Image (spheres, rainbow, N blue to C red):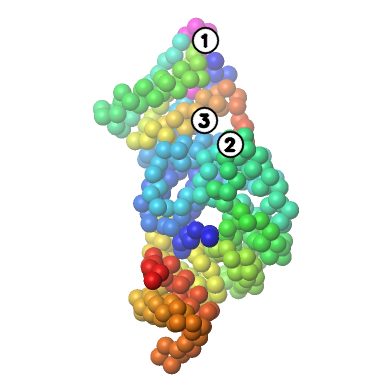
């Protein structure tokens, strides 16, 4: 069974910023993304790559998942990034501007060759595909489903709007279709799906509104560009006490009924069947609650 | 090895260190100047890290200046490695 990872928030940390990287584990995000791509100047790519390598080796990130965003293989930096980072086996490599399953296949071949050279298994580190072009949105079902090593996909709102020649607006109208299509691809493939960043760090209400919308349409988490945004995102993606109580009751009663050979039953006059139980189990996982099997 | 060109790596930001490397004439050895906001407490270990890395790359005929703002050891090593590689003309996977 696949290990459950909570990914409500993923904090972007520029790969050439030692002060932020060394504190990566104390901000409280579920994941940190050490970025070698857009946040690093073209003439500092070598510097950031060496810094991120040393930091991953030396810094304790505690329970925070560590991912590294590498540059695309079509740039002069992508292969050098993989050669440096893959041997360290962070939790995941994030690949930007993914446009096809073929591209993912090529990336995985390179990753596996590096792992073979270092005597590493192909099953530890996962890959996240970033969908941030119209072509990526078009091919997202295949990208999400063809390789088991892809365990999350993400939307890159800024690049996507640029690729579509439209302006990113606070209501997200331009990327709404893309968001929903990408969510559906992730759900069909049973993998995580993270929403794009909310760029205005001073607009807390706007962040909450956008995060609530993302949750409503199926996202499992959201990218973060400033540690100040983490708490709001966690509040939205963490179930309320009432939801947890209800979920606990549903799972408890489901197990008791199942033991008695009853599949469908009612709580407070509402029918409880497998999909409701499935949702309740997910809520308990998000709340870090395990119900012991009797 | 001897630096081929002048180089630098790092920044003046807090928790970072900037290294400047310049080639010196033949048989000059090493000239090292270290400045740090935490020199009194960590000067010895800072110097040891720098010398070990210069030894590792067998660097000689080099003038090295460091200005440290409280960088951790992995940062010091990363910035110095970058400066050394740049001075040796190794620019893999970057744009200069």
Describe the element under mark 2 as helix, strand or loop: loop
Q: Between residue B47 and residue A204, name the one nearer to us.
A: B47
Give percent across and percent down for residue B38: 29, 32
Q: Report the mark closest to the observer, 1 or 3.
A: 3
Q: Determine if the magenta segment contains residue B24.
A: yes
Q: Of helix, strand and loop, which one carries label 1?
A: loop
Host chain of mark 2: A
Between the residue at mark 2 and the residue at mark 3, the CA separation in whole angstroms equals: 27 Å
- Residue most extreme to the front: A260
Quadrant of the frame with the C terminus of chain A: bottom left
Distance from the alpha carbon under mark 1 to that under mark 2: 44 Å
Tell me, yes or no, whether dots 1 and 3 are on the same chain: yes
A128 is higher (above) or lower (below) than A184: above
Q: Which residues are magenta?
A: B21-28
User: Can you name the residue that lies furthest to the right here?
Assistant: A102
Contact (Cβ within 8 Å) of mark 2 with mark 3: no
Badge 1 vs badge 2, beta-carbon distance below 8 Å: no
Q: Which mark is residue B82?
A: 3
Residue at image location 51% in from the left, 35% down from the top: A50
Residue denoted by label 2: A119
Mark 3, secondary structure of its residue: helix
Q: Is residue A290 left or right of residue A43?
A: left
Q: Are marks 1 and 2 on the same chain?
A: no
Q: x, y (%) of residue A189?
A: 62, 65
């Amino acid at each position: 069974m696949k290990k459950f990872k909570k990914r409500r928030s993923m904090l972007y940390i520029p790969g050439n910023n030692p002060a932020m990287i060394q504190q990566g584990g104390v901000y409280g995000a579920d994941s940190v993304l050490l970025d070698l791509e857009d946040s690093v100047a073209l003439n500092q790519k070598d510097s950031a790559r060496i810094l991120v390598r040393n930091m991953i080796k030396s810094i304790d990130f505690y329970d925070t998942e560590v991912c590294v965003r590498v540059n695309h293989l079509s740039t002069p930096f992508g292969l050098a990034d993989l050669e440096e980072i893959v041997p360290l086996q962070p939790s995941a490599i994030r690949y930007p501007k993914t446009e096809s399953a073929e591209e993912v296949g090529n990336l995985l071949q390179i990753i596996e060759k590096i792992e073979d050279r270092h005597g590493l298994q192909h099953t530890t580190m996962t890959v996240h595909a970033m969908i941030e072009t119209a072509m990526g949105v078009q091919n997202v079902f295949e990208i999400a489903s063809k390789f088991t090593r892809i365990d999350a996909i993400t939307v890159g709102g800024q690049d996507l709007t640029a690729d579509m020649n439209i302006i990113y607006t606070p209501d997200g109208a331009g990327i709404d279709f893309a968001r929903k299509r990408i969510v559906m691809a992730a759900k069909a493939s049973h993998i995580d799906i993270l929403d794009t960043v909310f760029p205005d760090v001073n607009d807390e209400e706007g962040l909450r509104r956008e995060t609530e919308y993302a949750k409503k349409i199926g996202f499992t988490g959201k990218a973060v560009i400033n540690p100040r945004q983490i708490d709001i995102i966690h509040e939205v993606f963490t179930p309320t006490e009432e939801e947890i109580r209800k979920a606990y009751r549903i799972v408890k009663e489901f197990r008791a009924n199942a033991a008695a050979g009853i599949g469908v039953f009612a709580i407070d006059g509402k029918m409880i069947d497998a999909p409701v139980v499935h949702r309740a189990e997910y809520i308990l996982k998000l709340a870090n609650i395990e119900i012991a099997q009797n | 090895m001897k630096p081929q060109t002048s180089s630098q790596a790092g920044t003046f930001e807090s928790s970072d260190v900037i290294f400047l490397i310049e080639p010196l004439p033949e048989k000059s050895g090493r000239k090292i100047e270290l400045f740090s906001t935490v020199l009194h407490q960590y000067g010895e270990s800072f110097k040891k890290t720098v010398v070990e890395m210069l030894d590792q790359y067998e660097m000689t005929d080099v003038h090295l200046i460091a200005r440290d703002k409280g960088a951790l050891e992995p940062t010091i090593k990363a910035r110095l490695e970058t400066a050394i590689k740049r001075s040796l003309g190794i620019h893999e996977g970057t744009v200069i």
